[in-house]
Image (spheres, helix red, strand yellow):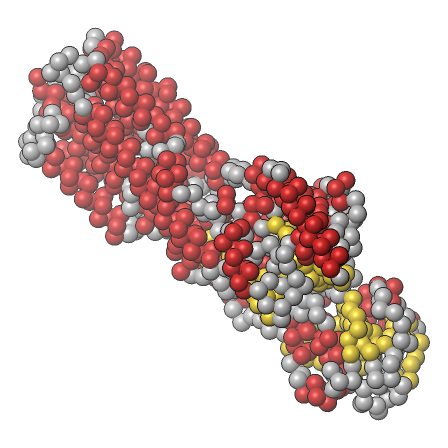
Amino acid sequence: MINVKERLKDKTITDRRKIMSKGSDEAAATKLQNVSRSDQDFYFAMLESHIGGLSSIQAKERLSRFGFNELHHEQAPTWIKQLFQAFINPFIGILLIIATISFILDVWLASPGETDYKTVVMVGIMVMVSSLLRFFQEYRSNRAAEQLKSMVKTTATVLRNMTEKEELDIKKLVPGDVILLSAGDMIPADCRIVKSKDLFVSQSMLTGESLPVEKSSLVVRDAEEKPLVELDNICFMGTNVVSGYATAVVVNTGNQTYFGTLSKVIVGKRAETNFDIGVNKVSYLLISFMVVMVPLIFMINGFVKGNWWDALLFAIAVAVGLTPEMLPMIVTANLAKGAVNMSKHKVIIKRLNAIQNIGAMDVLCTDKTGTLTMDKIVLERHLNIFGQEDEEVLKWAYLNSFHQTGLKNLLDVAVLEHVELHDYLKVEEHFLKVDEIPFDFQRRRMSVVLKQRNGKHLLICKGAVEEMLNLCSHAFDPGDDKQLHIQSDQVMPMDEAMRKMILRTSNKLNEAGLRVLLVAIREFDDRALNYSLEDEQNMTLTGFIGFLDPAKPSAKAAIEALQKLGVNIKVLTGDNEIVTKKICQDVGIPFDQVLLGAEVEKMTDMELKEQIGEVSILAKLSPVQKSRVVKILKEKGHTVGFMGDGINDAAALRDADVGISVDTAVDIAKESADIILLEKDLMVLRKGVIYGRRTFGNIIKYIKMTASSNFGNMFSMLGASAFLPFLPMLPVQILVQNLLYDVSQVSIPWDRMDEDFIEKPKKWDASGIKRFMLYIGPISSIFDYALFAVMFFVFKANSPEHQSLFQSGWFIEGLLSQTLIVHMIRTRKIPFIQSWATAPVVALTSLIMVIGVLIPFSPFAGALYMQQLPLSYFPWLIAILASYCTLTQFVKTWYIKKFNQWL
């Protein structure tokens, strides 16, 4: 014994020295290889652990040494990094270039006594206001997102102090921890299998291989010669258990895991979503117009007025005025506010951009159980093969459900509610569990093997009707016997007539909305405990158990509400089509045809794409088929949401535009989802869709306001530059006007959207934004020119000596028209009559308009080279603004009729 311990100690020390001499990633891989090729005594010694787990003191010390079991690069960035990133966007870049040029021209190269900091200061204020607002909003949203995520805990079952089992947050796992795994669990760290039973693990997120692989505790002697992912006794962080169960010991945690080392290469900045692409297209559309128009304005002013220096300064100011520097902040504020609002309605947003996707969703694929139904299974019927109530069938089912150790689903829970059978059957005294064949999605059944008092082994199997029938060679004739023993009942061969009778009974139960399983048994003499799938044959059928999961009372109303919002519902289920059709009828999902998994499997992608539009029910689907259906729908141009909570939903959740799960889902489903509902109810999801569309609407609203306003200003600047003998507005005046206008739009995230906007899914449409800009933008120029004529001819502000009067008049008119456009564009309806903005929008825009009117009369007028306007100016101003609003409303009505679109 001493020699063995010494050899273990020496080998462990040698292995550790080898590992520590390598780099971090290589050391982690070597550690996995070492435990893979080692026997249990060796790898437990290497990890300084024990089959009974770590003590609390050991776990605490290791947590301090190794840190939390989490990937640090996935954490929210530090506030300093967020602050730096807030300044990184194309519009801020343009402003910084303009500020640099202005500093060189107005300060560095200026003659003594002629230095002018106004442009630099104003541009600096704009940059700071936009970037700091964006920073504060993103910082708050990141903190809120972390808090919201913390509401959804992922845990692992851990052995501590040799005997205690406890559910522990996976981030507190440390190397050496002994954990228990079963179907539905996400592997929380890199682990070595200690013992297992029919353990199948999906590694698709690491390897791309869709089929699960079997894992066992057997030693891999040539571990150093194999790729890590091919080590059959190692489970990797982030993969998930499909079926079976196991005990495992944690080897690596956090960034030392295989996934952690991969993440340094493959996980970083996310690939651009449609939302990101849409924002970027709009950004560069605005920049492209500015790049063309600003040099044109510079050239016209230079040639017409002969002062190229002033023309350059004016062009710089125009460039600032045309830069929508608040766009990043407005987008972020809208998304963050949407996330907070949705969290109040039991919708947790894991990724901010998912808000736009849920608003754009036009197809929702959902599972049936728990979403459309009560998710409260009741064991309604237990029938013998002749369709008669029979207690004996219930007893077999109870023994099966009680003794299974795999994933207990809702059907098992319903069976186990019959606790009165526990003492009567003496399930623990008379029946000793000796083996188990766990459930998996391919077989759709599970078995337990019990040792009876007579020494014989009894296999009890329950599963789906069609699969079970093929495995039964006999059936019980129940007679009058109601006791639990095999010998009393006669056994009859399973002939074709009996098969048809059983199928008819099953179909009849299905049509009543019941989920039906068959229960069968097989007896063996005492034998080695090496039961496998081959033993699930030649069984004797005992009867039916029927479960009822009624439709939710709220499901029908929720389906109707989603359909009114333009969301088409498709049910993707592994259940049979008869039960699914009954539930769909109850909740109001129309269907003409049903596609089964077997039919989907035979179709090409083109054939499936042609049929999928008319199909609302796809039944008996495998996980791979669910994922395929989602991909086909996306290829057809739909924005697809997928709602699921099971192991078999994980792939489809990842492949959908927006993956939706619930906080009670299995670990891998929660990890795969973009949005998590705190209540498994489609009515909650409906609220999420509405908030998503409202958020997206406010973003589009700002973009169209900015695009059209800026485009109109370009035309006005061009015209004024061509005929005026002076600059139509000084650079500092443009900067102040632009700053005030930007501030007026900060309240847009708090605005509401008209009901007709919420009714249909909305997507990014760069061409629509461009068309809107070209049609609506020039309207403001018409009234700018009208104001130019009034100032030029009525108030005689037509010479350089009177330019401040002209500039003061256009400053007020330009600011008020730009601010009014907020109210004109925000709705399809007539503003102030049919639709009012929210109080924050009205208050802030009104305040900015008042400030704009008062500036020429304030002490700041001199610093801005403005002067007081005569009172006779204001009737003209009111007439011009009223005409502007009237024409805009007229064009809006025409535009909506012609293009059937506004926002």
Residue 102 sits above or below residue 484 on the image: above
Rendered residue at 9%/30% (across/down):
861
Residue 81: horizontal and vertical position, in percent? 39, 38
- Closer to us: 717 or 313: 313
Which residue ends up furthest to the bottom in the rendered image? 480
Query: Quadrant location of residue 215?
Result: bottom right
Q: Is residue 30 visible?
A: yes
Rendered residue at 54%/64% (across/down):
56
Judge left or right: residue 400 versus residue 278: right
Rendered residue at 64%/43% (across/down):
17
Judge left or right: residue 219 versus residue 113: right
Q: Is residue 824 visible?
A: no
Residue 812 sits above or below residue 695 on the image: above
Query: Quadrant location of residue 482?
Result: bottom right
Quadrant of the frame with the N terminus: bottom right
Quadrant of the frame with the C terminus: top left
- Closer to us: 651 or 545: 651
Rendered residue at 70%/67% (across/down):
406
Residue 621: horizontal and vertical position, in percent? 71, 56
Number of callouts in the render? Answer: 0
Residue 93 sits above or below residue 101 on the image: below
Judge left or right: residue 870 versus residue 837: left
Which residue ends up furthest to the front in the rendered image? 2
Residue 750: horizontal and vertical position, in percent? 32, 50
Residue 7: horizontal and vertical position, in percent? 73, 53
